[in-house]
Image (cartoon, helix red, strand yellow):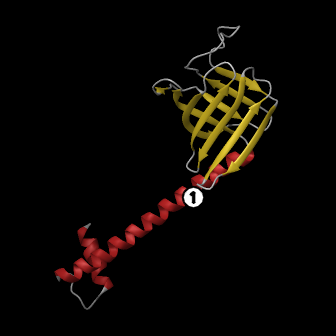
Amino acid sequence: MLNKAFEFCRNLNTKCPAWHESCTKIHMKKLFILLSLSFFVLGVSAQDKKEIVVKDLIEKQQYSFIAEYAFPLNGNSIYLTSGYDLKVSKDSVNSNLPYYGRGYSAPADPTKIGVNFISTGFEYKSEQDKKSGWDISIKPKDAGDIQRLELHVFSNGQASLQVYSLNRQSISYNGYIKETKKK
């Protein structure tokens, strides 16, 4: 590997022999700067691609928010196992999220403790904010005591979700969005 670097340096400047230490250092610095710039450009283009994918998902309104952490209003963060999500499409919002916190009234059905609903009647508003992210507001009209869902999606796909309810304390979730496959 070192021989190839010396050969490269020798080809850059034929007046300077490869064994001359100061010339070799200069050429190696040039090579290092060139490689550093190329990695920087590749990193920026990968970030731009991710932002384009995220923007496309939000514009198509066909994505899932995958919850990784729950943040109850009066408690510590809770790491969530897989399987908790909020699926958003143009015609429905499907929530399968756990709930931790204080309820102001007990649910009639004790199996409905989480934030679980399917809504087909809802208001959906999406705005791109100044910091290269999106603020999404979802107001389901047929989801029981759920008043509003506020989702903030960053350009890298990371997201935070706040759920506001009539009969319970609000709760937040952190996670990421991904494409929802059509069935």
Q: Where is mark 1, residue-wise?
A: 48
* Image quadrant occupied by the N terminus: bottom left
In this rendered view, identify the residue nearer to me: 158 or 168: 168
Residue drawn at point x = 31 percent, y = 83 percent: 11
- Left or right relative to 76: residue 94: right
Q: Secondary structure at mark 1?
A: helix
In this rendered view, identify the residue nearer to me: 106 or 97: 106
Residue 181 horizontal/vertical position (percent): 69, 37
**Which residue in the rendered view is the most extreme toward the front?**
104
In this rendered view, identify the residue nearer to me: 75 or 95: 75
Residue type at numbered disc 1:
Asp
Residue drawn at point x = 25 percent, y = 92 percent: 15
Q: Is residue 19 visible?
A: no
- Left or right relative to 8: residue 41: right
Vertically, is 25 above or below 89? below
- Left or right relative to 109: residue 29: left
Q: Is residue 165 visible?
A: yes
* Image quadrant occupied by the C terminus: top right
- Left or right relative to 110: residue 13: left
Residue drawn at point x = 52 percent, y = 28 percent: 71
